[in-house]
């Protein structure tokens, strides 16, 4: 009923809509023809996907039932519709009264394309056209790297040598910065910076009311690296701290040999410890079963299913909670298939069978999302899609 | 011809013994195409000819089936599919996903294979547009043309194994079975690349600090510092290091095809050589300055000077990085091919990628638009609307200031996936012509 009312409002033509359910799938041919020529807020309305839940229960109620802050990360093979699914989920959360933030951590940002609104610039921007507060953010790698570098401060070798009382060598070593190599070298730093920044936002009073955070992650390859990054950072920071301590000890011993009066040691700043704490927090967020969920998005092809299976294996190995699998771009029901669509549908059905047999994916809740003829772009289209996928 | 005829005659019994009734029907269809065995493909693409090409697909598919049987069990093992799944339709063995026709009449492929100098092709673009299929089919075509070829997958989520229907994991060169000329495939193993990088930098970095302390005559502190290894600060390779190491290896192949990671990763790959050059430079600089300090200390004590360790490995690695950076911008031996699909979002992303590549002076000449609907006289409503939308995306490409200058190659979408060498050969013969 709610969906029907929404459809009527969206189409602005209440009398001509004819919807009925066929085998659990909404019939869309006539509806699609009807709205294809309509214009909403000057934007040509495009509907690309309709969704039907394989299970009868309403799972979206489960997703919105609590007021506790929750994080959703949507990932999967490139080009399967992660951005559309993430954006539609964010729109649906906002429509249900949850102030929401959607963040894109893929360096090749497409949230702007999905919302048909310029969201670049690396700052939170309100999305227009949604009833409740919805902010979007496209992380800019360069800005984030500068911020992290600034926060770790200047830990040059020069400072270390100065503290050893060897002033005559300070000039030669002054321009070396070990931490620069650390900061610049880490793959996946974009994702860490994004998630860490969002976690910082959440601690600020003005953002305390945002209870749903949706991450549109980079394609699978990045996600696989992202998972191991916090551990790497933990190890690296420990090494730097260790190096500092040992050089300090060496300096003390050196002074004893020369009998010099010991120079009072300036206490080393602990920005590194703060950075380490932030990494720890990000890692904990990843593995918190109560507040975090990773949703895998895929399409019904053998290669995509194989990649999703590998992704799920990696996530399970890292103890990241995964409950849902969205199979996007399925051909919708039709009475007048051409030969091309008929063969293609047969192939897609076979691939769905592969999912049922896969040991990794068969345990997930399956959400089917059919493919329509046009792309999902703009808030009205995303709202429509969200109402049908996330039900 | 004789071999093919023999295969045709022997095929029906095989089908009957192993496949369901549905696939038996497929077998019958297969027999009905026997008279067309002599059909040869034409370079001129017309709707009627294309229709015949589709039928040609089915015959080719049968060959695909034959070759794929050996690998089915590898796939089963890999996909954790139970043996009960063996009861597939005959179509499981065959998959041809795209048929392509060039918009230009000139033979582009001749230009690609001319000259004996080693050439590098990097195929990149938005995820899920068919980069792996295009890269694999290009490699197969090069090999069939007599050029020993290497195809490398640098996407951490490897799918070359899926595309060739052969297990290529392990991070080592694996010969691909099927093509006439030598064709090897390599899925870069990040762990191995990391080990190589670490061993090169660690050997010198760690020694530096230790030598420094030792040179100061403070033997009692050596064991405390012995475990320090500055090189380990670079434990994790920067993005794109996999590509760089692969390129710097001395392969005896005349053509190397890279199947790169999705756009975001490629954008960062472009700045890698500059970063590595600076990074290794810093390590060497640190080592030199420590050596200088050591010399000064020794002169105070009048000790005999100890020769510093050579930094040969790091220097060599640095030279390789410089070579890679130059290679990326060499318009004669390197080409970046952008792969996309006809949707607004994919075209927008391709435009951004092209802009970034131009900014980095990487040569880009070709754009492949994949998954186009093939011409058809009996469209259903769905296909009709979808085709209209795709035409709009194609117009968008022609009007885009970034993409309109590239050579446009169209690759239509067919009903099934491209998997296995015969299917890739078919795809390659039609896309790259």
Image (cartoon, rainbow, N blue to C red):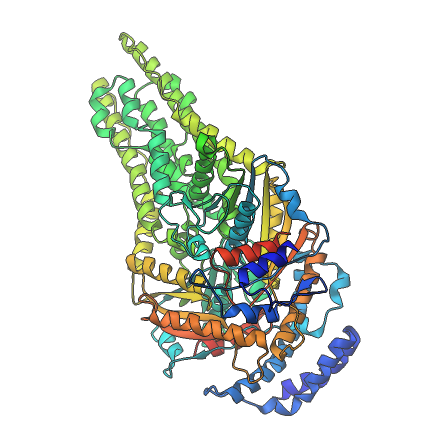
Residue B342 percent coordinates (x, y): 46, 69
Residue at the front extreme? A15
Q: Residue at x 31, y 23 (%)?
A: A160
A137 horizontally vs B61: left or right: left
Question: Which quadrant of the view contains residue A175?
Answer: top left
Residue B253 in view here:
no
Residue B38 percent coordinates (x, y): 59, 91
Residue A35 percent coordinates (x, y): 53, 67
The quarter of the image holding the N terminus of chain A is: bottom right
Q: Which residue is drawn at 50% across and 75% down?
A: B387
A341 horizontally vs A149: left or right: right
Question: Which quadrant of the view contains residue A20?
Answer: bottom right
Note whether A375 is above or below B273 in the view shown.
below
> How many numbered dots are placed on residues in this image?
0
Note whether A192 is above or below B98 in the view shown.
above
Residue B122 percent coordinates (x, y): 40, 63
Residue B340 in view here:
yes
Note whether A298 is above or below A251 in the view shown.
below
Pick whichever, B29 or A105, lies toward us: A105
Q: Residue at x 67, y 74 (%)?
A: B91
Pick whichever, A322 or B58, lies toward us: A322
């Amino acid at each position: 009923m709610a969906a029907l009312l929404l459809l009527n409002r969206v189409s602005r033509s209440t009398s001509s809509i004819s919807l009925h359910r066929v085998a659990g799938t909404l019939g869309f041919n006539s509806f699609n023809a009807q709205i294809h020529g309509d214009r909403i807020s000057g934007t040509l309305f495009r509907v690309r996907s309709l969704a039907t839940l394989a299970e009868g229960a309403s799972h979206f109620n489960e997703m919105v039932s609590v007021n506790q802050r929750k994080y959703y990360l949507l990932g999967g093979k490139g080009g399967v519709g992660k951005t559309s699914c993430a954006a539609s989920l964010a729109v649906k959360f906002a429509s249900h009264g949850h102030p929401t933030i959607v963040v894109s951590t893929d360096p090749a940002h497409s949230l702007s394309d999905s919302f048909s609104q310029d969201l670049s610039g690396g700052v939170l921007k309100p999305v227009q056209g949604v009833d409740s507060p919805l902010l979007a953010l496209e992380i800019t790698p360069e800005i984030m790297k500068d911020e992290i570098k600034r926060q770790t401060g200047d830990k040059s070798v020069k400072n270390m040598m100065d503290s050893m009382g060897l002033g005559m060598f300070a000039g030669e070593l002054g321009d070396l910065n070990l931490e620069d190599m650390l900061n610049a070298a880490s793959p996946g730093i974009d994702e860490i910076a994004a998630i860490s920044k969002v976690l910082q936002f959440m601690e600020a009073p003005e953002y305390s009311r945002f209870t749903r955070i949706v991450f549109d992650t980079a394609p699978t390859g990045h996600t696989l690296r992202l998972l191991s990054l916090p551990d790497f950072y933990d190890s690296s920071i420990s090494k730097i701290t260790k190096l500092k301590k040992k050089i300090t000890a060496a300096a003390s011993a050196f002074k004893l040999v020369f009998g010099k009066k010991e120079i009072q040691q300036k206490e080393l700043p602990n920005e590194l410890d703060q950075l380490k704490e932030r990494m720890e927090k990000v890692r904990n967020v990843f593995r918190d079963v109560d507040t975090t969920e990773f949703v895998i998005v895929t399409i019904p092809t053998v290669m995509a299913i194989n990649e999703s299976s590998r992704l799920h294996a990696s996530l399970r190995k890292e103890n990241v909670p995964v409950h849902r699998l969205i199979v996007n771009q399925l051909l919708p029901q039709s009475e007048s298939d051409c030969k091309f669509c008929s063969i293609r549908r047969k192939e897609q059905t076979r691939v769905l069978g592969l999912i049922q047999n896969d040991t990794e994916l068969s345990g997930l809740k399956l959400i089917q999302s059919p493919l329509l003829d046009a792309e999902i772009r703009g808030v009205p289209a995303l709202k429509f899609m969200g109402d049908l996928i996330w039900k | 011809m004789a071999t093919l005829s023999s295969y045709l005659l022997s095929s029906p019994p095989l089908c009957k013994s192993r496949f369901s009734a549905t696939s038996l029907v497929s077998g019958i269809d297969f027999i009905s195409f026997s008279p067309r065995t002599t059909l040869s493909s034409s370079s001129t693409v017309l709707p009627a000819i294309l229709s015949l090409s589709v039928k040609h697909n089915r015959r080719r598919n049968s060959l695909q089936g034959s070759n794929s049987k050996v690998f089915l069990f590898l796939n089963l093992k890999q996909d954790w599919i139970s043996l009960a799944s063996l009861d597939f339709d005959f179509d499981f063995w065959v998959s041809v996903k795209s048929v392509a026709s060039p918009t230009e009449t000139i033979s582009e492929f001749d230009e690609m294979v001319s000259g004996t100098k080693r050439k590098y092709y990097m195929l990149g673009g938005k995820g899920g547009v068919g980069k792996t299929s295009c890269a694999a089919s290009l490699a197969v075509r090069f090999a069939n043309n007599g050029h020993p070829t290497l195809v490398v997958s640098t996407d951490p989520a490897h799918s070359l194994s899926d595309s060739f229907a052969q297990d290529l994991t392990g991070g080592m060169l694996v010969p691909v079975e099927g093509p006439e000329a030598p064709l090897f495939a390599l899925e870069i193993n990040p762990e191995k690349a990391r080990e190589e990088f670490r061993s090169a930098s660690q050997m010198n970095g760690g020694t530096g600090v230790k030598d420094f302390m030792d040179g100061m005559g403070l033997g009692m502190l050596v064991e405390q510092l012995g475990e320090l290894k500055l090189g380990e600060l670079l434990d994790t390779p920067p993005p794109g290091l996999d590509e760089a190491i692969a390129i710097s290896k001395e392969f005896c192949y005349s053509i190397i095809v890279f199947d790169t990671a999705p756009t975001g990763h490629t954008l960062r790959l472009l700045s890698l050589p500059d970063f590595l050059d600076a990074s290794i430079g810093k390590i060497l600089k640190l080592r030199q300055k420590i050596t200088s300090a050591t010399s000064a200390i020794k002169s105070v004590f009048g000790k005999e000077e100890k020769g510093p360790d050579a930094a040969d490995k790091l220097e060599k690695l640095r030279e390789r990085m410089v070579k890679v950076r130059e290679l990326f911008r060499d318009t004669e031996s390197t080409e970046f091919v952008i792969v996309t699909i006809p949707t607004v979002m994919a075209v927008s992303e391709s435009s951004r990628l092209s802009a970034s590549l131009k900014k980095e002076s990487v040569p880009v000449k070709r754009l492949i638009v994949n998954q186009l609907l093939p011409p058809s006289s009996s469209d259903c409503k769905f296909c009709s609307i979808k085709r209209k939308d795709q035409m709009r995306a194609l117009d968008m490409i022609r009007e885009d200031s970034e993409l309109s200058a590239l050579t446009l190659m169209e690759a239509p979408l067919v009903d099934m996936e491209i998997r296995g060498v015969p299917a890739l050969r078919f795809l390659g013969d039609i896309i790259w012509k």
